[in-house]
Amino acid sequence: MKESLTECEIDIFLSLVRGDRVVVRDHETGALWGGWIDMTFSDHGFIWVITDVGERKLLDIGVHTLWRPEESGACGSVRREAGRLEDDRALTTDISPGN
């Protein structure tokens, strides 16, 4: 679990809606990956995400940081991580929901 949440993280988390493209940082494993919002339960701090490889994962704001890769106002260093993820993704096949 993260020690604390920033106001920026909370604002982004609460603004996410179904279909939003996101990048996720798992603070337990250090993994960085992308996907799409499937369902939100923001009042409870959870969001379902479909990963780029087609897995459906339940994310907890206390363990994961989420942001939209295209947002210029993403919190702190996560913008740099999003750029690296997009560069890496160019080497793989993009799997969109429903395909």
Image (cartoon, rainbow, N blue to C red):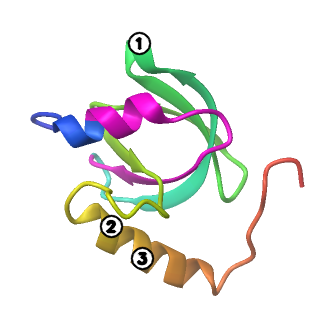
Residue 93 visible, this orientation: yes
95 or 12, which is in the foreground?
12
- Asked if residue 42 is positioned above or below residue 50 in the image, the reply reads above
Residue found at the far front of this picture: 72
Q: Is mark 2 on a helix, strand or loop?
A: helix
- Above or below — where is 90 with respect to 72? below
Task: Count neighbours of disc 2 (C-alpha within 10 A) and say few if under 14, some if 14 to 19, many if 20 or more.
Answer: some
Label 1's element? Answer: helix
Sequence order check, earlier mark of 2 and 1: 1
Residue type, mark 3 in image: Gly
Residue found at the very far left of the displayed protein: 3
According to the image, label 1 marks what residue? 43
Seen at 32% across and 53% down, the residue is 29
Label at residue 79: 2
Q: Indicate whether 4 appears above or below 72.
A: above
**Horizontal side of residue 82 vs 97, given as left or right:** left
Query: Is any part of residue 1 visible from this angle?
Result: no
Of the pair 84 and 13, the residue shown nearer to us: 13
Residue 96's spot in the image, x, y percent? 78, 57
Is residue 71 rendered to the left or right of residue 91?
Answer: left
Q: What residue type is labelled 2?
A: Arg
- Location of mark 3 (residue): 83
Picture quarter with the C terminus: bottom right
**Numbered range of the magenta stretch:** 10-27
